[in-house]
Image (cartoon, helix red, strand yellow):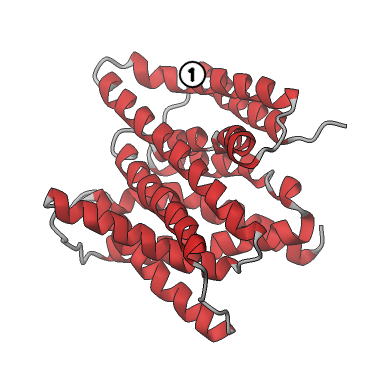
Amino acid sequence: MNYQTTLLYLSTVAIWGSTWLVITFQLGTVDPIISVIYRMALASVLLFCICRFLGVTLRATRLDHVFFMIQGVLSFGVNFWFIYMSEMFLTSGIIAVIFSLIVFFNLINGRIFLNRPIERNTALGGLVGLCGLYLLFSPELSNANSGENALKGFGLALTAVFSASLGNMAATRSGMLGHSVWRINAWSTLYGAGALSIIALLTGTPFTFDYSVEYTMSLIYLSIFGTILAFGAYLKLMVIIGPEKASYGALMIPFVAIGLSTIFEDYQWTTMAACGFLLAVVGNYLVMRRPR
């Protein structure tokens, strides 16, 4: 890897790995759905400004907007909403490892919606990864006081992974047609914020705001770094070294996330949890590696 490629790779891993912990600063006073609305709305405004600055046209067909909307509602809307709620029940490191299974879901959905082949190592890797997640998650379940909450968090995180994966299928379709990533994400974040706003209004969720430094700074970080720059760096990386090698960054993100969770959230490691974490990483490696 050259200097630019290395910088893009490390930036993607560091930013996405840190966002899981930063999300915890968004929880508390403001309802999770409202926090996601603020995040996506700010990201959308900035992305439209970037498109204007770079001279990227925002015009697209009605069918293109349908797929922008699908991506926005699923990836930038439901996905993040459920992730925020899941972090109310589980540590950020655990959720990051669960979310790494998106590689497995992407391959399955890619076969269904994009007619992409599934290799045998995919099935093996998925099985190993699921076994690893069970071992990693079992210490949380063994605590009688947090067992029910742990199940809620796991269910929310797994639903978020599936939703994000379906959104990725729509994004892949848009990318294959040559749309700029800035245009795709500008419209998608707008649709995601709009969809969640409708849900919030229908459910009577108040649009409150936390003016604390922690909440405001974390919101800005998640909007600019976690939503705009990380996606931009990752897509640039795919152009330079290809999507297969770029995907290996997903193996490092849980390491960063669970490392930060250990430092700042006092995550307690057990032998079973450590074995489960390693199995989850090995499973994802088997899924992503290309057979010789």
Mark 1 Cα-neighbour bin, 10 Å: few <14, some 14–19, many ≥20? some
Residue found 30% across the figure and 63% down from its top = 38
Judging depth in this view, the residue of 231 and 89 nearest the camera is: 231
| Residue that badge 1 annotates | 134
Left or right: 178 in relation to 231: right
Residue 159: image location, x then y, percent: 40, 34
Q: How many marks?
A: 1
Vertical order, 73 against 253 (above or below) = below
Q: Residue furthest right?
A: 292
Residue found 14% across the figure and 48% down from its top = 203
Residue 119: image location, x then y, percent: 74, 28
Question: Quadrant location of residue 182?
Answer: bottom right
Judging depth in this view, the residue of 67 and 285 nearest the camera is: 67
Judging depth in this view, the residue of 265 and 23 nearest the camera is: 23
Query: Can you say which quadrant of the picture contains the N terminus?
Result: bottom right
Give the residue type at disc 1. Tyr
Vertical order, 177 against 115 (above or below) = below
Residue found 75% across the figure and 47% down from its top = 245
Q: Is residue 225 in view? A: no
Left or right: 26 in relation to 110: left
Vertical order, 266 against 247 (above or below) = above
Residue found 52% across the figure and 65% down from its top = 184
Residue 101: image location, x then y, percent: 55, 33
Residue 98: image location, x then y, percent: 48, 33
Query: Can you say which quadrant of the picture contains the C terminus?
Result: top right
Q: Is residue 62 in view? A: yes
Question: Quadrant location of residue 69?
Answer: bottom left
